[in-house]
C-alpha cells in the first residue's frame, strides 16, 4: 500500500510472542502451556513484526540439534503471521532475522518441523524438506525442513 508504514522486525522477550503463538498455532492450548523448551535459553532469540504497536508476526529460534544429528543446530519455532498481513513479506522478514541470529552465533544447521500447509512458504525462503511426513496430534501433518540457502 502506498504510504503504509512498513512492518518493523524487533527482538522481543519470549512472552511477547505467546499471544500469537497461541492464537494462530496452538488454539487447543492455554497461554500457560505455550512456552517451548529452550525459550529461556540465553542463546535463543524471539522476534516480532510490528505494525505500529501491534504485533502481526512472530518467530523464535532455540539451540537444538536436528533429529538427524549435526551439531551445532538451531530450531525455528513458533513461526506465524496474522491472516491480514500474510503474503506481504512478514514471514520472510522474520526468517531473515532468525538466520541473522544464527549467523551471529556461530552458524549451524537451521531446521524446523513444518506443517504441510507451510511447506510452500519455507520452500520460497530457500529451505528443503527432509525425511518423511508424520501426524502431529491436534495440529496435523508435518515434515522436517532445513535451510539450505
Ligand atoms: C506460513 C506463514 C508464517 C507465512 O507467512 P507470510 O507472512 O505470509 O510469509 P511471506 O509473505 O513472507 O511469504 C514469503 C514467501 O512464501 C510464499 N508463501 C507464503 N505462504 C505460502 C503458502 N501457504 N504456500 C505457498 N507459498 C507461500 C510467498 O508467496 C512468499 O513468496 P514470494 O515472496 O516469492 O511471493 C503464515 O502463512 C502463517 O502464519 N500461517 C499459519 C501458521 C503456520 O502454518 N506457521 C508455520 C508453522 S510450521
Image (cartoon, grey):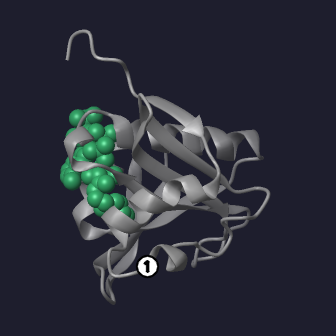
- Image position, residue 32 (x, y; %): 53, 77
Residue 91 sits above or below residue 30 on the image:
above
Q: Position of residue 115 (x, y in %)?
A: 31, 69
* Secondary structure category for the residue under label 1: loop
Q: Residue at x 70, y 48 (%)?
A: 107
Mark 1 CB near ligand 1 (8 Å cut): no
Relative side of 31 to 114, left or right: right
Q: Nearer the viewer, residue 43 or 65?
A: 43
Q: Residue 44: where, in percent of width, then height? A: 70, 57
Q: Is residue 53 above or below residue 126?
A: above
Crowding around mark 1 (Cα neighbors within 10 Å: few <14, some 14 to 19, many 20+) is few
Image height of 71 relative to 97, above or below: below
Q: Is residue 56 left or right of residue 94?
A: left
- Disc 1 designates what residue? 30
Give above or below for 72 relative to 149. below
Q: Quadrant of the N terminus?
A: top left
In the rendered view, does 69 fall on the left or right side of 1?
right
Which residue does the image show at 22% across and 49% down from the upper left? 83
Towards the viewer: 112 or 37: 37
Q: How far across and how far down the image is residue 48, in percent?
A: 50, 43
Who's the residue at 40% across and 77% down the image? 131
- Residue at the image point whose x is 32% and y is 74% from the top: 27
The mark total stands at: 1
Amino acid at each position: 500500500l502506498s504510504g503504509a508504514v512498513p512492518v518493523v522486525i524487533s527482538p522481543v522477550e519470549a512472552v511477547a510472542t505467546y499471544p500469537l503463538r497461541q492464537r494462530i498455532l496452538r488454539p487447543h492450548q492455554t497461554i500457560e502451556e505455550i512456552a517451548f523448551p529452550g525459550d529461556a535459553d540465553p542463546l535463543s532469540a524471539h522476534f516480532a513484526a510490528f505494525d505500529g504497536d501491534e504485533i502481526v508476526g512472530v518467530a523464535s529460534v532455540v539451540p537444538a540439534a536436528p533429529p538427524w544429528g549435526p551439531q551445532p543446530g538451531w530450531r525455528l519455532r513458533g513461526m506465524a503471521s496474522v491472516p491480514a498481513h500474510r503474503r506481504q513479506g512478514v514471514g520472510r522478514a522474520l526468517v531473515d532475522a532468525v538466520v541473522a541470529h544464527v549467523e551471529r552465533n556461530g552458524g549451524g544447521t537451521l531446521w524446523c518441523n513444518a506443517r504441510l500447509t507451510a511447506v510452500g512458504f519455507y520452500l520460497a525462503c530457500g529451505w528443503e524438506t527432509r525425511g518423511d511426513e508424520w501426524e502431529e496430534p491436534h495440529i496435523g501433518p508435518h515434515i522436517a525442513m532445513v535451510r539450505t540457502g
